[in-house]
Amino acid sequence: MVKLKDKSTEQKILDAAKHVFVTKGMSGARMQDIADAAGINKALLHYYFRSKEKLFETIFSEALEKLFPKLASILESDKTIFEKIEMICVEYVNQIQQMPYLPVFIISEVNRQPEAFLKKMTGNRKPPLKAFVTTIEIAVKRKEIKPVQPLQLLMNIISLNIFPFMVKPLLQYVGGVSKKQFDALMEERKKLVPQIIIQSIKK
Amino acid sequence: MVKLKDKSTEQKILDAAKHVFVTKGMSGARMQDIADAAGINKALLHYYFRSKEKLFETIFSEALEKLFPKLASILESDKTIFEKIEMICVEYVNQIQQMPYLPVFIISEVNRQPEAFLKKMTGNRKPPLKAFVTTIEIAVKRKEIKPVQPLQLLMNIISLNIFPFMVKPLLQYVGGVSKKQFDALMEERKKLVPQIIIQSIKK
DNA sequence: GTCTATAACTCGATAGAC
DNA sequence: GTCTATCGAGTTATAGAC
């Protein structure tokens, strides 16, 4: 049952599948594309992962497992609310830089088939939403920050951090931004976004 | 050639197709889904619009024609930079409230096949990107606002206005937000977002 | 484990009756 | 204009040789 040696083929498939699924979406992705990207043939995909659906679930669970734990631990730490927000922003961008296609993928699939997709999603780890809301409510009660609606604040944080990665192709093709310029912009945002957020909540 | 009476079937198809394309994406959408949603059968789709591709283009052009003109005219007006930004935010949200699925659709398709899709896109009206950048550069030169990188500011504006619409299903299913609550949040953001943006650039 | 060949099925598109 | 029936291309999935 345990395979230690041959990471190679299985891992090649996983890497290829991640890229293909996440750029083309579940329905746009072709098993042939994945096989080509992995340098093998279609039959092997079914040998390792019974079906397209199973392969998809494997990729997706794996990707999501990385997304939330660090955010939760930041929220649970004993930093100030301002430090927490800064750390959350940096952590968000760091995580997404490692899997820049994921946001588009999640958003598309959630819109395509909300119930089915979110069942898979919450089958694994949940986003630390409750922890965030509580953290903000406490900070408001202690008058450390302006009275803000936690959901609005959360939307602001996530919007400012994630959306730019989703419009990368637009920036490149319409805005004439090169890959290097894009990376520089994103790096700059790690400081810029926390500033904006903190300015919007500090008294 | 001119059909005045029977909006009904053709319009039913357009309405149905808009919804299906834009929630499921180009490749996820099925002609059968569209036919079902329109209450007709597949053959009629091909009778009115030769192919899936043509139907798609019709929908898409129509949707995009509405998106940019107002933004351009705001930028060209003689309002102050702060008034312009506020108007842009409000206008963005107004437009998107009328076609809330469009952002997800555009983002997905742009990521799927950037060149092909953007050719169609720019075949019609272009987003007034240049006008925006110039407007900001002038405001900076006149010292009306802090020195800011126009692209960063643009990303902030668009992120804060559009992204929340894209995560509507997440808010509903994970955050337990009802449709009414969501609408209220978005309405609130028409004031909230301009405040945040303006606070981030004023001296 | 990996391949080729092909079965089984989905879906866009068309033919043809009404 | 609208329908039912069906074709043909493209895809997922499997059988079977190596």
Image (tube, coloured by chain):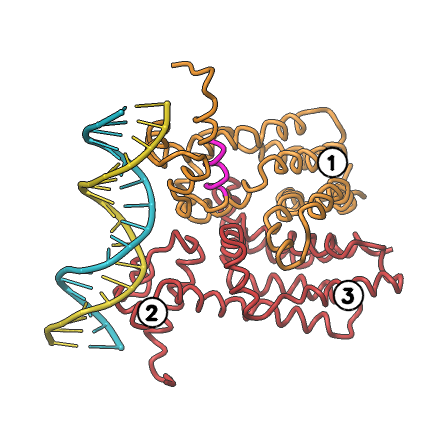
Chain colours: A red, B orange, C cyan, D yellow
Q: Is residue B51 magenta?
A: no
Q: Is residue B62 visible?
A: yes
The spot of residue C1 in percent (x, y) is 27, 77
Tell me the chief SS of the magenta region.
Answer: helix
Local SS, label 3: helix
Q: From the viewer's perspective, is residue B78 above or below residue A121?
A: above
Label 2 crowd (10 A; few <14 / some 14-19 / many >=20) = few
Q: Amino acid at mark 3?
A: Thr
Q: Dot 1 corresponds to which residue?
A: B86
Name the residue: 54% across, 69% down. A123
Picture quadrant where residue A26 is located: bottom left
> Mark 3–mark 2 contact, CB under 8 Å?
no
Marks 1 and 2: in contact by CB < 8 Å?
no
The quadrant of the image that shows the N terminus of chain A is bottom left
Residue type marked 1:
Glu
Separation of residues labelled 2 and 1 (CA atoms): 53 Å
Q: Above or below — where is B86 with respect to B182? A: above
Q: Position of residue B113 (x, y in %)?
A: 41, 46
Marks 3 and 2 sit apart, C-alpha to C-alpha, by 42 Å
The residue positioned 62% from the left and 57% from the top of the image is: B173
Please state the horizontal and vertical placement of residue D14, each as a whole percent of the image. 24, 67
Asked if residue A192 shows in the view, the reply is no
| Chain to which the residue tagged by mark 1 belongs | B
Range covered by the magenta-colored residues: B14-22
Q: Residues within 10 Å of mark 1 (few under 14, many from 20)?
A: many
Q: Which residue is mark 2?
A: A50
- Mark 3 = which residue? A134
